[in-house]
Amino acid sequence: MTIKSEPFVVNLGPQHPSTHGVFRLRLTLDGEKIIDADMVMGYLHRSMEKLAEERTYTQNIPFTDRTDYLAAMTGNLAYVLAVEQLCRIEAPERANWLRTIMCELQRIASHCMAIGIFANDCGAWQTPVMHMLRDREKVLDLFEMACGARLTLNYMRIGGVSRDVPPEFMPAARRLVKEMPKKLDEYEDLLLENEIIVARSRGIGVLTPEQAMAYSVSGPMLRASGVAWDIRKADPYAAYGKVDFDIAVGTNGDVYDRFVVRVAEMRQSLRILEQALEMIPEGPVHAQLPTATVQPIGQPVAPLAIRPPVGEAYGRIESPRGELGFYIVSDGSPAPFRFHIRSPSYINLTPLKLMSVGATVADAIVILGSVDIIVGEVDR
Amino acid sequence: MPSSGHSVTAVITGLDIAHRIDQRFPGAVAEAAPEAATVEAAQLIEVCTYLRDDPDLKFEFLSSVTAVDRLEYFEVVYHLTSIRLNQMTAIKVRIEDRENPRAPSVTSVWPGANLQEREAYDLMGIVFEGHPDMRRVFLWDGFDGFPLRKDYLVGPGGRFPGLERFPGEPGGPLGGRG
């Protein structure tokens, strides 16, 4: 007698602790092995790209907080850089340094979450993530000092930042930079050599460098595959051209290397912060916007509405998750004609099927965790 | 593998890339502008393969694919990056047919276009021919219309003539069948 068997479909999500938000993975299984993986997205789709077409350039900045809500600073910066490129505005020196400091603080906060939740996915339930949340709070305290908010920061402005940091910010930031390496040592001791994490993540979800590039994967995922590509280095924006740091690169392109690369990137962020906090000059934090872009003669327009010249710009930065780009088309009116977000969370999901097929269900959870998606940014 | 030190990504302008493409594939360039070269849809795949494989270009990384509704026509915009040579460029494809917009899929050249083309289909309604999985991504099957089109929906005080209500809403142009 033969036992009849057929593929079995499992819905992972949308309400599942390891999907990192409302994201559904439909896995077709042969026993424990995955034979097909289909992503179902859109639960958090707010049609930001359409909404943005009806709002002025400045009114759109808060939207960029709400795409990648764990890295609002980098979202803000990518957008304002694209608009600045369109208007040919340059931010003053101090604003550029403040942007660099904020983005690196944000990277530390975001990677804390990524690593903590990843440990969760591996089965180290809640304890490691609590350590990392504790340290992320310190960064959020700094953001609160700078702009009054902890998550939806809305700090960057077209031509600079919204306000200078208060006097107590710099000492507090220096203290964080001094204390954080000890915390990172602790993470490494706790997790890097942890037998369970190594067993769960080594050799799983492997992407070769060629695959990673062909699938448009960016950020720590691309670097874990051994491609030393970092936009901060390749095409420096803000003040990244003036600081010294290394690109953290992995070798195997597996889940474990992505995790190691993120920890190494936090160390590099601290290195950048150390230099930036020393080198930041005094001065204005907001550029004088050219009057031509503010108020064209003979056209009724709301005061201070920025009207970039007709044209288009693609601005991109290295967010904690990869290449975050904003493609903006201007028709000369106060609102963008087209506002497109090239979101790294979404595009990094492209090879998910490639990575998951052949693995087990438990592996799929770890693989998804290693992509470090933010569903707000996936669905937009 | 890539360059180290403080370099800057070299931007190959639309005019330069148009010149290179035109030398290799005469007649493939429909229009050259400083921002991007517009390529004939029929020759898109050949041009993209050339851009990916040419030793001076090596655009092995497709940064972004998106579509723009230019009112009279649609445009698909491709931003390309060469990680090895640290350079960028952009090409476009123009789609005149607003009723049934179609463009060739570049997934055979860059698999990374998969989800991005699905997004452009979902929100702008452009069908990418040759795409392995041309389905909606964010919206559900059966959703009426393509929201990013300029004639889809305009809020109060909006700038573009269009529908006053969501297509599925009672009283909307498509009735209450959404």
Image: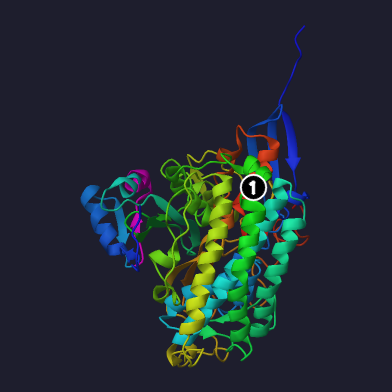
Left or right side of B120 for B36? left
Which residue is nearer to you in this view: A10 or A304?
A: A10
Q: Is residue A148 above or below residue B34?
A: below
The answer to whether any part of residue A232 appears in the image is yes
Residue at image location 57% in from the left, 61% down from the top: B149
Position of residue B68 relative to residue A275, above or below, is: above
Q: Residue at x 29, y 50 (%)?
A: B28
**What residue range appears in magenta?**
B35-48
Residue A148, picture quadrant: bottom right
Give x and y (percent) for residue B130: 47, 39
Q: Amino acid at mark 1?
A: Leu
Q: Is residue B23 magenta?
A: no
Q: Is residue B45 magenta?
A: yes
Measuring from the top left, give residue B121's x and y in whole percent.
56, 51
Residue position marked by numbered label 1 in the rendering: A368
Q: Using the image as rendered, state which of residue A40 and residue B136 is in the foreground.
A: A40
Could you tell me which secondary element the residue under label 1 belongs to? helix
Tell me residue B107's x, y (percent): 46, 43
Residue A137 at x, y = what percent?
A: 71, 72
Whether residue A1 sits left or right of residue A106 in the image: it is: right
Question: Which residue lies most toward the top here?
Answer: A1
Residue B148's image quarter? Answer: bottom right
Tell me, yes or no, if residue B161 can be seen here. Answer: no
Quarter of the image that includes the C terminus of chain A: bottom right
Rendered image coloring scheme: rainbow
Crowd around label 1: few <14 · some 14–19 · many ≥20 (10 Å): many
Q: Quadrant of the N terminus of chain A?
A: top right
Which residue is pictured at 48% across the width and 86% down the height?
Answer: A94
Give the chain of mark 1.
A
